[in-house]
Amino acid sequence: MLNSVQLLGCLLIGGLISGEIVRRVIDLPRTTGFVLFGLAVWTSGLGWVQPQDIESARLFVDLALGLILFELGHRFSAPGWRIVRGRLRAGLVESVFSGLLMFVTAAALGFSPVIAAFAAAIGISTSPAITIATSSDVGAKGRKSEILFTLVALNGTVAFVLLTFISGISGTGGWWQCAHRSLEPIFFSVLIGLAGALLAVQGAKRLGRYVEHQHLLLLGLIVVAVGTALALEISVLLPLLILGVGTRILDRSNEVVTIRISSDARIFLVITFVLAGASLDVGLLSKYWGEALVFVSIRLAGKFVALQVMHRYLGLDEDDVGPMVIGLMPMSSVAIVLVTDMRMQETQGFTEVYGMLMTAILLMQLLGPVATQYAIKRFGEATLFMRGEKMSSASSV
């Protein structure tokens, strides 16, 4: 029986090997290998990872999500208010329209309005971890990749706000208590994020552009932000997104040397995907695959219709809409935590939707990295490709 330290080491080595195999042999993203290894070591496979192991690693996962969300926020591009306004408008329309379609679909499948709204909010979010990791694998650089990151950030923000309101109104008490439960987490999220961004920019100015010092500063601020969010019992999603976006906007003189999880803190990335794979139950696939496929199809259809209408606001051609929607396919790893938490709280009626959501997340964890890789290559913005064991530059894809 492996102890927790041995298990962590085995997961790191196994995840690394699996990721390299799928990348070098069949040219798939390393993240696919990480997830497949997680599935292999779960109780239905080798049995190395048990439910209690995942729970004990929750803090590690929260820190990893914090790093991922900070990087996603810091990748926010500010090319000019007119362009940013168009991207925000298109992203909000895409998030809300696809969410409405998923809500109607879940309600039509017989779920209560609150549960249907929860499922729709989960479906709105796109995985920042898969987007960042896969983009790093293929060396994504370009305007369309920046738009993809902006849409992923907006998806996550809208999903978090909706989930916060749903949690607030599903509790007991009058309208004032419901409003308080809904607005308080958003207020503290904004406060934590902005305070951290101010400290990051001011600290970077005083430290100078020394990578090792600035990375310690940023890592410390991220850990404090995650810890504060956990202490206040709010999600780490919005505070860390605001921390990243705020740092990018406030850093007008480009003093901050940002930290990249795919290179500077890759240990967190590998463990996150391996544990995400280990959290998924392949057995649910045979029972809920039909409902999950309907849910995923409606999710993608909603995003496609919305972006088809709003593509000019993003500065995209019609031919770019399909690849952009495919790039938005991965469902967020945060969803695994949220869905599992709701099940553990024994929320009334939630058991019915649990199987559908977890099956949809399983499909997207496996197909999502491939979809993101395909989208970036279709954009013509992949600057790296694999040849045997050597990473090379590519002038075109």
Image (spheres, helix red, strand yellow):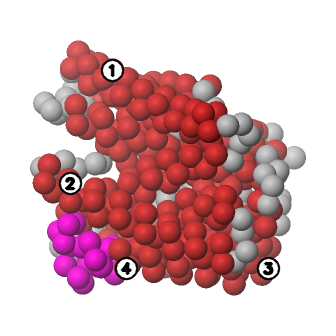
Residue 115, given in percent of the width and then of the height, sits at 68, 61
Of marks 1 and 4, which one's residue comes earlier in the chain? Answer: 1
Q: Are the residues flagged by discs 4 and 3 in contact, CB closer than 8 Å?
A: no
Q: Which mark is residue 374?
A: none
Real-space CA distance between mark 2 and mark 4, rounded to the nearest whole angstrom: 20 Å
Q: Which mark is residue 305?
A: 4
Q: Which residue is mark 2?
A: 85
Give the structural element (helix, strand or loop) at label 2: helix
Q: Residue at x 29, y 64 (%)?
A: 90
Q: Amino acid at mark 2?
A: Arg
Left or right of 57? Residue 348 is right
- Residue 294 sits in quarter: bottom right
Q: Which residue is mark 1?
A: 199
Real-space CA distance between mark 2 and mark 1, rounded to the nearest whole angstrom: 27 Å
**Label 1, residues with CA under 10 Å away: few <14, some 14-19, many ≥20:** some
Of marks 3 and 2, which one's residue comes earlier in the chain? Answer: 2
Left or right of 172? Residue 215 is left
Q: Amino acid at mark 4?
A: Val
